[in-house]
Amino acid sequence: MRKFQVCVIGSSDATYEQYSTAYEIGKYTGTKGWVLVNGGRGGVMEASSKGAEESSGVAVSIFPFDDIDKANAYTTISIATTIGYARNCITVASGDCVVIVGGKSGTLCELTFAWQMGKTIFSCSWVEGVSMDYADKKLDDKREDRVIAVHDLTELFEKLDNFYEDWLSRRDN
C-alpha cells in the first residue's frame, strides 16, 4: 500500500524560525512513517528533509534542475525534473496534503497550484511569510473551504493525525 505523503513548502532562504519549524515537521513525518515531499533545495526544504532523515523517514525531493546530486544533503530520493519552477506543480501534486512554512513568491505559486488541485492546505500562521499571510483565507470562490490556519506545532500535528486517519478511511472504502 502506498504511504501517506506530506508536502512541505517554504522559502529556500529560511529564517531561523522557518528552518526550525520545518525541521520539526520533517521529524514528525519521519517518526510517523509518512513520506515527506518537498522541492529539494535549501531552507525550509532542507530543514524538513533533515528532520525526516534524522528520524529514519523518507524525504523525496522534486528538484527543479537536471542533476539529482544537487538536491539538499538530507534527500532520500531525488527526482530531477529539468523544468525549473514549473516543478512546483509536481511538488504539491505529490502530497496528500500540503503544509506551508513561511515562504515567498515560489511558495505562493505552490499554494495556488495546491488550491486549484483541491488539496488540504495547513498554514503555519505563526511563521512570517506566505504561511502567515494566507492562513485562514480563501484564494477565490472555487472552493468552500479555506487555507487551514494552525497556530503551533502541537495543533498542526493533531490536524495531520486527523487528516491521516481520514485518508486511511477513504483508502479502505
Image: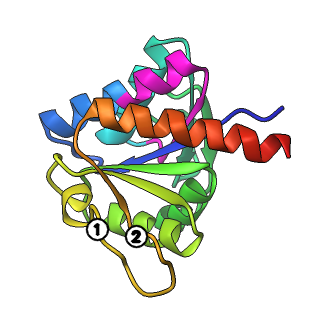
What count of labels does the image hold?
Answer: 2
Q: How far apart are marks 2 and 1 (CA)?
A: 6 Å
Q: Residue at x 40, y 43 (%)?
A: 41
Q: Which residue is drawn at 44% across and 29% down?
A: 49
In the rendered view, does 80 fall on the left or right side of 169?
left
Name the residue tied to disc 2: 109
Q: Residue at x 34, y 67 (%)?
A: 108
Q: Which amino acid does label 2 sit on?
A: Cys
In the rendered view, does 115 fall on the left or right side of 118?
left
Q: Does 41 appear above or below 113?
A: above
Q: Does 53 appear above or below 99?
A: above
Residue 104 visible (yes or no): yes
Q: Quadrant of residue 172?
A: top right
Q: Quadrant of residue 90?
A: bottom right
Q: Quadrant of the N terminus?
A: top right
Residue 73 visible (yes or no): no
Q: Does 51 appear above or below 124?
A: above
Name the residue tied to disc 1: 105
Across and down, in percent, residue 77 comes to 63, 31
Across and down, in percent, residue 51 comes to 40, 21
Instruction: Determine whether the residue tagged by mark 2 lies in a helix, strand or loop.
Output: helix
Q: Is residue 35 magenta-colored? A: yes
Q: Nearer the viewer, residue 39 or 150?
A: 150
Q: Magenta stretch: give its range.
A: 25-40
CB under 8 Å between callouts 2 and 1? yes
Q: Which amino acid does label 1 sit on?
A: Ser
